[in-house]
Image (tube, rainbow, N blue to C red):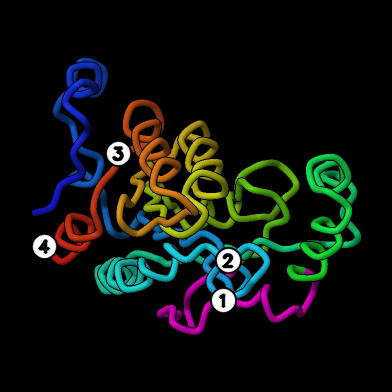
Amino acid sequence: MQRYQLEPEFEPRHAWTRGEFHLLEAADPATTAHLVIDMQNGFLREGALLETPPARAVVPQINAISQAVRGAGGMVAFTRFAYDPNERAWDAFYRNFLNPDRSARQREAFGPEAHDLQLWDGLDVAAEDLVVDKTRFSAFIMGTCDLHEILQERGIRTLIISGTMTNCCCDSTARDAMQYGYDVVFAADATGTVSEIEQQSTLLNMALLFAEVATAEDIVAAFQG
């Protein structure tokens, strides 16, 4: 096993807070979903506006988790970061947090039917898998999509989160999912972002506060077992 390891200075706080209980070991495949965040051309394509090279490297791990969860009777869901020209609730992001050139290019890149909106063709996507477009970082914030309602209808209690970007949409989704009452498992080596410091900082914060952090190998073993 390749269990995710905290730096030694953080281990006592983690043990004091969380104890020995492991969400992954207690997960029921029938109420588990692998939630793959924003693995789209717009993040994985070379030369894309938001290219995130480390995200390309984690595709095999993501596919392995999907196959294990699906094979055990769980579900797989994919989100796509999208720009909806008819949505006004998040317009301040494009006006105030992006410069005019970047704002215009990002709206175009992730607009309806855009090539960069589409899922990366190296992903294992089955006909029965769910694909949901979201317009904001978190897939659970009110008004961005109906993912929470769909998962509740299907009785999902445990979420395994993988994808990109680790410190943005994966992080935001995991935080909100935990506060909605889901048991969240965050895949340490099946998430990717721009820099190593952003990756490791997010994994630490997840482990201490919001999720159980695990490797793809441990996740696959849990569902194959």
Residue 185, x across and y down, in percent: 33, 46
Q: Which of the two marks, 4 or 3, is nearer to us in this view?
A: 3
Q: Which mark is residue 51?
A: 2
Q: Residue at label 3? A: 212
Q: Residue at label 1? A: 45
Q: Is residue 20 left or right of residue 110?
A: left
Q: Is residue 80 left or right of residue 153?
A: right
Residue 113, magenta (yes or no): yes
Q: Which residue type carries mark 4?
A: Gly
The reply to whether the C-beta atoms of the residues labelled 1 and 2 are less than 8 Å apart is yes
Write down the quadrant of residue 209 in the picture. top left
- Quote the CA–CA distance across marks 1 and 2: 6 Å
Q: Closer to the N terminus: mark 1 or mark 2?
A: 1
| Mark 1 surroundings within 10 Å by alpha-carbon count, few (fewer than 14), some (14 through 19), many (20 or more) | some
Name the magenta segment's main secondary structure. Answer: loop
| Mark 2 surroundings within 10 Å by alpha-carbon count, few (fewer than 14), some (14 through 19), many (20 or more) | some
- Quote the CA–CA distance across marks 2 and 3: 27 Å
Q: Which residues are magenta?
A: 111-131
- Quote the CA–CA distance across marks 1 and 4: 35 Å
Q: Closer to the N terminus: mark 3 or mark 1?
A: 1
Q: Which residue type carries mark 1?
A: Arg
